[in-house]
Amino acid sequence: MKKSVKAALLSALVFPGSGHFMLKSRMRGFILCAVSLGCVAFLMNHAMQQAFSVMDSLQTSLAAGASPQAMTNALTSADQGEESITVKLASWAVMGCWIFAVIDAYRLGKEADKVS
């Protein structure tokens, strides 16, 4: 298998930047991995905070004897705060890093294929 295809598949299927490590472009791979991991960590932290917030509101609703409609409203209104913009930006950053990593790994692999 050509280096270009192997590097692009690694970046696409494993994690952004992993194809760069195979091509010995470690700094670029490290930057892509670090940005992606940072954004994923932020998204996971936000998801956990939202889950705990929903659990707390459901527990108080159940303790107060709320109707199923009130519990549904508590669930659907959980992610409509000011942080939703940062969540969208972090999601776009992960997707952008992933797409850039695949394209760039393929491009660098093509150059490596020409040399060898």
Image (cartoon, grey):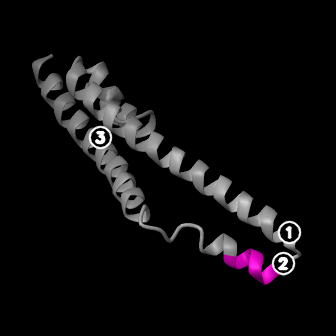
Q: Marks 3 and 2, how far apart in space? A: 49 Å
Q: Is residue 17 above or below residue 66?
A: above
Tag 3's secondary structure?
Answer: helix
Q: Marks 1 and 3, how far apart in space? A: 48 Å
What residue sits right under mark 2 in the picture? 66
Mark 3, Cα crowd under 10 Å, few <14 / some 14-19 / many 20+, is many
- Quadrant for the N terminus, please: top left
Nearer the N terminus, badge 3 or badge 2?
Answer: 2
| Depth check, front residue: 51 or 19 | 51
Q: Which residue is painted at 38% across and 31% down in the image?
A: 10
Q: Is residue 74 above or below residue 11?
A: below
Nearer the N terminus, badge 1 or badge 3?
Answer: 1
| Depth check, front residue: 52 or 37 | 52
Residue 92 lies, in percent from the top left, at 34, 56
What residue sits right under mark 3 in the picture? 102
Q: Residue 35, located in which quarter of the rendered image?
A: top left
- Lateral position of residue 108 relative to residue 87, left or right: left
* Circle 1: residue type: Leu
The magenta region covers 68-73
